[in-house]
Image: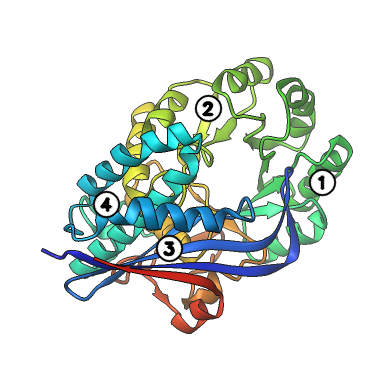
Amino acid sequence: MARIVGARLRVLRAPVSDGIAMSFSPLRHRSAVLVELSTSDGLVGRGESWINYPPWAAEERVATLRDGVLPLLMGRDASRIASLHDLLCSRLDPLGRQWGAPGPVRQAISGADLALWDLAGQRSGCAVGALAPGPVRDAVPVYASSLGPDGVGDTARACLVAGHTALKLKVGFGREVDERNLSEARAVAGPDVALYADANQAWDVDEAVAMAPLLRAADVAWIEEPVRGNALAALEELHRRTGLTIATGENMYGRHEFRVFAASPAIGILQPDLAKTGGLTEVRAICAVAEACGTPVLPHLYGGAIAFAATLQLAAAAAPVAGLEYDIRDNPLRDPLLDRAPTPDGGVLIVPDGPGWGVTVDEDAIEAVTDSEVQLSA
């Protein structure tokens, strides 16, 4: 038995240089909590918890991991991933409901669950995606994400030069800006490149309905999180009134919520995030729900190196995954932290096949972006 004997939490933080903006807030720093679990057989597994928003999320996440998640794991058998995930969810989900913060609790659980899967792959001597039942693919298509709201034409051209065959544009910055950017993105992309849009919950239903003709004029294949609050009833009304294909899931927590959305004809694409909704254990279950409903999965991915590598391993093993989000903006917590980071070629990423997450991290690079750390032992 490989017992969990120690843990280290490192808050990673680095400024970004290219003015990333969402409809609700700019993103001036990339941040993540790196969760490292050590076991009695000498292995260290790494997971990641998403903390891009709000700017003070790191303090909450470290506290939840230190005082809530890790005490439940210390001394336990690291190989019993499913039972440990059940333990964490059964003990902490009720606290999250009472707190009014189910998301932060699940984001904390995600970091620990991912570290357990990394340990499992390392112990087996293979990539996580090759663990039972085994891989279904060794390469996955990607779409270039996060164009806009400024410099859309130049960014789109750079994406095409890099070989991308699908682009996603940020919208929700006002009708005039959105119309200009949609038109410019389609003009640069031409008719053969897929175009998607992400509103980050910018609109109410009537506003989203009013935007539908602009989305259609630009031949946008699907719109992500169009409505504030992401309530299923509102999304169903939008779909009923416009017929738009709707994608959602990055701010949904747990397979039960995804099951309700997957069963709705309004939802065309599910977008769980491994570093947010409960880790690989939860997203594997969500993929099973999606497959039963015939709904494709395009995982949300806007984190750092470990979330990136883990999502690639999910794509290797989960049949409903139709592609991955590839963040084209400045991200000092992704490629710089990896030795020979996977990069797209012709709009496709090859899944790395090393033990665990398949990649090798650069410890010096991680230290350079470590803002603070906490260590615990059993």
Drawn side of residue 152 relative to residue 85, left or right: right
Q: Amino acid at mark 4?
A: Leu
Q: Amino acid at mark 2?
A: Ile
Q: Quadrant of residue 46?
A: bottom left
Q: Could you say whether the residue bearing mark 4 is in a helix, strand or loop?
A: helix
The residue that label 2 is drawn on is: 267
Q: Position of residue 369 (x, y in %)?
A: 56, 75
Q: Are marks 3 and 2 in contact (CB under 8 Å)?
A: no
The residue that label 1 is drawn on is: 181
Q: Quadrant of the N terminus?
A: bottom left
The residue that label 3 is drawn on is: 309
Q: How is the image coloured?
A: rainbow
In this rendering, the answer to whether 27 lies above or below 366 is above
Q: How far separated are the C-alphas under marks 2 and 4?
A: 36 Å
Q: How far separated are the C-alphas under marks 3 and 2?
A: 27 Å
Q: Nearer the viewer, mark 3 or mark 1?
A: 3
Count up the numbered dots.
4
The residue that label 4 is drawn on is: 72
Identify the residue at image location x=50%, y=38%: 101
In this rendering, the answer to whether 9 lies above or below 323 is below
- N-terminal-most mark, 3 or 1: 1
